[in-house]
Image: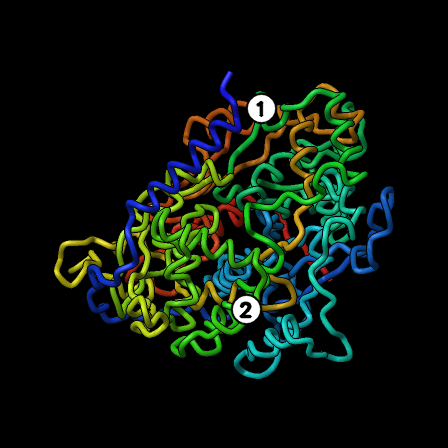
Amino acid sequence: MKNPAVQTARWLISIYLSALLCGCYSPGGPVPEAPVSPSVREPVPQKVIVEEEVIPSTAPQDNGVPPDPCNWIRFVRYRPETADGQPKAVDAILVLLPGYMGGANEFEYMGRQMVSMAEAGGEGSIEVWAMDRRANCLEDLTGVNAAEEAGELPDPSIAVDYYYHGASIDGNTFAGFLQEGQMPYVSEFGLKLIMDDVYTVIREKVPSRADRSATIFVGGHSLGTPLTGLFAGWDFDGDPNTLDDAGFRNCAGLVLLDGPVFYPDLQEFNNIDEADYFQRVADIRSGAAPRLDMFTGVTPEAMNLLEILGLYAAAAPDEESTVLREVPYSGDVDFLLKLLHSRDVGNFITGVPSARDFRYTNEAALGVFMDDNFQPVQMLQASMGFLQGGPVVAKDFPGSVAGALGLGGIALDSLFIPWDAGPADALGTGPLYSWVNFDQVGNAADPNYLSTDGATLYTTMTEEVTDIQDFARVLYRGPSNFTEWYFPSRLRLDMGAAGAPFNAQAGLPWFHNAEVDVPVIAFGAPHGDAPDPSAWDAYRASIASTDFTTIICPGYNHLDINCAAVDRPGHRENLVFQPLLDFVLSHSSGTVLVP
C-alpha cells in the first residue's frame, strides 16, 4: 500500500522543482488582433413583467430554528406584459430549478427573452418561474440590491461600502458571511424539502391537477436536471399504489438543460448503504461532518464579489476596474484568485504577478474570470469573447495538478491568460486590457480570432455565443441573484439514497421513474456538463416516455445554455430558446390563468 504522506511529499517536491524550472516572470507574448465590427442587433421587443413571488411554508426545525425569511418559498415570475398589468391566461408555465450553488437568476435572461419571444411570435403565451432553493434565504443581498436600484445604472460602490466598509443601508449593516456553526438547521435543507417546495408552488398557484398536467413543464439546469428527473418520479403521498400525486402526473413535460441525467441503475442515486446514510445525517446535524458542500475556494464572499463584478461591468464597462486592488477581500478569496489566475505552477506558488497586478476594464475583469478561454472550471464557463490590449499567452494551470488541489471538472487545454502586468519592478503599470464581445471576434468572412502575427489561434466565432453585458445583468438583476451562497451538503447525501432500497425510510419516496410518460427535451453543450448520448439513451430507456428529444448546441459552454444571445441571429442563432418554446407550446393541451 502506498504511504499517503510519502505521496504528498513527492508531489510537493515535484511542484517545487516545476516552479524552479518555470523561471521568473517576464512580460510579453502574442497580442490579439483587432476586433471586427459588431453584428446588427435584432432585439426581441420586451413584453414581460418580472416579480418575486413568495409562498408561506415553515422551514424544517428539527435541528434549530432558521431565520424567518426561510419560512417562505421564493421564485421569480416572468409573465407577459398586459395593458392593465394583470396576469393573462397562458398556454404553458415553465418551472425551472437552478444548478449547483445556483440561484433563480440562472434563468434571468432566458425568462425575459422566452416570455417576450412567445408574445412577439403570436403562437402562444408562456410564463417562466425561476425557483430559489431555501438556503438562498440566508443571503444578505441588501448591498447589491441597493447598488442595483441606485439609478438608471447601478452604483457598485454602494455594495462595496456595505460589505467591506461598514456602511449602513436603511438602518442595516452587514453582519458578515455566515459560518457553518451558525446554521445547524441547514442539515434539514435536503432533497425532500426541494421536492416539496416545487410541488407546493405548482399546487398553490395552479390548484387543478388537470391544468397542471396540461400546462406545467418542470425543468432545470446542471444539477437542476437530476432534480427534474427526481421530481418526475417522486411520490408525494408516500403511497406507490396511487399515481395522481406523482410528479409526472402533475406536469406536461420535462426540460433538461445541460446536466447529468440520472436513472435508477446509476450509482449517483444509490451509492450509500442504510447505516452509513443515517450516520452521515447524524454527523451533519451535529456538525461532525460539513453542513455545507462548496466547490474548492468558492466561498459566499467570492460569490458576492462575482455579483459586484457584474454590477461594475454593467455600470461602467470601459472604465478601469479597481475591485481587485481596492476591495479588502479575505485570504480565502485571494487563494481562489490564485487558483483561477495563475499561468503555471511557478506563478501559482510565487504569486508574481498576481491578479491584482493586471489592469482590466470592468468588462474585462468579469470576462477573465468567467469566460471559457480563461476560466478553468467548466461549470463556471460562458463563451463571451476575448481580451485585447496586451499580450495573451497559453495557460496550463491548474491542468494536471487539479486533482492534487482537490479540484474537479477542470479544463485542461485551450486556456489563456494575459501576460503583461508591467515590468517586474513596476507591477501594475502594464497595458489596460479590455474586452472584445462575442460578436466581434470574427464573422463569416473571417471566423478566426488570431494573434497579430497570425501564429496563435485564440478562438473562433463558432465558439462565442453570449453577450458579456447580458451575462453581467444575469449576475445581479432583479430580486434574486445568480448564486447560492450556502449550499447544504444534505442534498448530495439525499440524492445518493434516493434510489436505494431504504429510500422510503429516509423520507425520499422516489418510486415511479419507470412510469414517467411525459415528453422530454434535453439540451447539451459540448463543453458543458451534459452526459454523452449513451447516458441520454439510458435515461430514455429507464422511463416510459416515447417522446424524447435531444439537442446538442455546438460551441456552447455550460452557462451558455441559459445565456446565449438571442438578438444577433445574423451572426449566430440561439440554439435553445426557440426549440424550447416550440416544445412547450406544442405539448401544452390547455391554458391557465394564474392570479
Q: Residue furthest bottom?
A: 151
What's the residue type where badge 2 is placed? Answer: Ile
Q: Quadrant of residue 188?
A: top right
What kind of element bears circle 1? helix
Q: Quadrant of residue 160?
A: bottom right
Write the residue at 31% across / 66% down.
424
State whether residue 425 is above or below residue 230: below
Q: Residues within 10 Å of mark 1 (few under 14, many from 20)?
A: some
| Disc on the earlier residue, 2 or 1 | 1
Q: Residues within 10 Å of mark 2 (few under 14, many from 20)?
A: many
Instruction: Give the residue at mark 2.
Output: 308
Instruction: Give the image location of residue 335, x and y in percent.
Output: 51, 54
Q: Nearer the viewer, residue 535 or 483?
A: 483
Q: Quadrant of residue 455?
A: bottom left
Instruction: Give the image location of residue 208, x and y in percent.
Output: 76, 47
Instruction: Give the image location of residue 294, x and y in percent.
Output: 60, 46
State whether residue 407 is above or below residue 105: above
State whether residue 10 is above or below residue 39: above
Instruction: Give the residue at mark 1.
Output: 267
Q: Is residue 185 left or right of residue 162?
A: right
Is any atom of residue 154 visible in this view?
A: yes
What's the residue type where badge 1 is placed? Answer: Gln
Q: Is residue 253 left or right of residue 376?
A: right
- Separation of residues labelled 2 and 1 (CA atoms): 38 Å
The quarter of the image holding the C terminus is: bottom right
Is any atom of residue 588 visible in this view?
A: no
